Each structure stands twice: as structure tokens, then as C-alpha cells.
Image (cartoon, grey):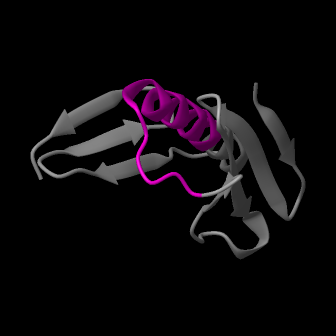
Amino acid sequence: MTDSHASEAKMSSTFRVGKRWTCTMTADLAAWPSPVGCEWSPDLPRRLKQHELQDYRRGRDAFAAELALHLGGPALVVEPGSNATRLTVAAGLETAGAA
């Protein structure tokens, strides 16, 4: 389940990742552009299983889409990997390729 909250200064969303974790993403809109914060509870996972990684990506991409709507422009998520770079556009279009 996703819990989202947006105000004039800050936007945040909390979502489940697997059975063990929750992830809270925050954006400081007053200082935009700025990095998006990501906090894990109860602790930072060392490694995610495939279904947990899918949960994380789904929540992260939903947050990026909500942020893009709020800001009135596109959002792009870049996820570097060991042999490929994954690009996600807030509209839900996705591509992957070698970096």
C-alpha cells in the first residue's frame, strides 16, 4: 500500500518492499531541483530478491510520476547496473540498454 502526502514545501510517499521493509521517498519542493531522499525501515536492505526489487521499482516509479505531475514536467529515473543502465520516464515508458 502506498501512503502519499504533498504540501507546498515537501512531497513524500511510503510503500512496502516485500514483507520486511518499507521505503519512504521524499522531495523538497522548496529547494527543487534537489536529490530525492530515500529512507528504509527497519534498516537498509543489503540485497533485494527479484520480487522485492520489482516492489521497489514500482513504488519509486509511482513517486516519480506523482512528482512529475506536481512539478508539471517529465521525470527521469536512471538506475545504473553492472552491465546495463535502466531508464524510467515518469509516464511509465521504460527502456534498458548498455551504458
Residue at image position (35%, 51%) is 78
The answer to if 64 sits in the magenta stretch is yes
Residue in the foreground of this view, choosing between 21 and 11: 21
Q: Is residue 45 above or below residue 32?
A: above
The region drawn magenta spans 44-65
Q: Quadrant of residue 19?
A: top right
Inspect the magenta stretch and tell me whether residue 57 lies in it: yes
Q: Give percent across and percent down for residue 75.
A: 50, 47
Q: Residue at x 56, y 41 (%)?
A: 60
Say whether residue 35 is left or right of residue 39. Answer: left
Q: Which of 53/72 is in front?
A: 53
Extreme-right residue of the structure: 7
**Residue 14 placed where, x, y %?**
75, 42
Q: Is residue 71 left or right of residue 74?
A: right
Image x and y of residue 22, in percent = 69, 42
Residue 91 appearing in the image: no
Across and down, in percent, residue 38 comes to: 62, 58
Q: Of helix, strand and loop, which mostly describes the magenta segment?
A: helix
Which residue occupies 23% across, 50% down? Answer: 81
User: Could you tell me which quadrant the N terminus lies in?
Assistant: top right
Relative to 85, is 58 above or below? above
Give the number of marks. 0
Q: Kindly tell me whether residue 67 is visible in this rendering.
A: yes
Towards the viewer: 47 or 83: 47
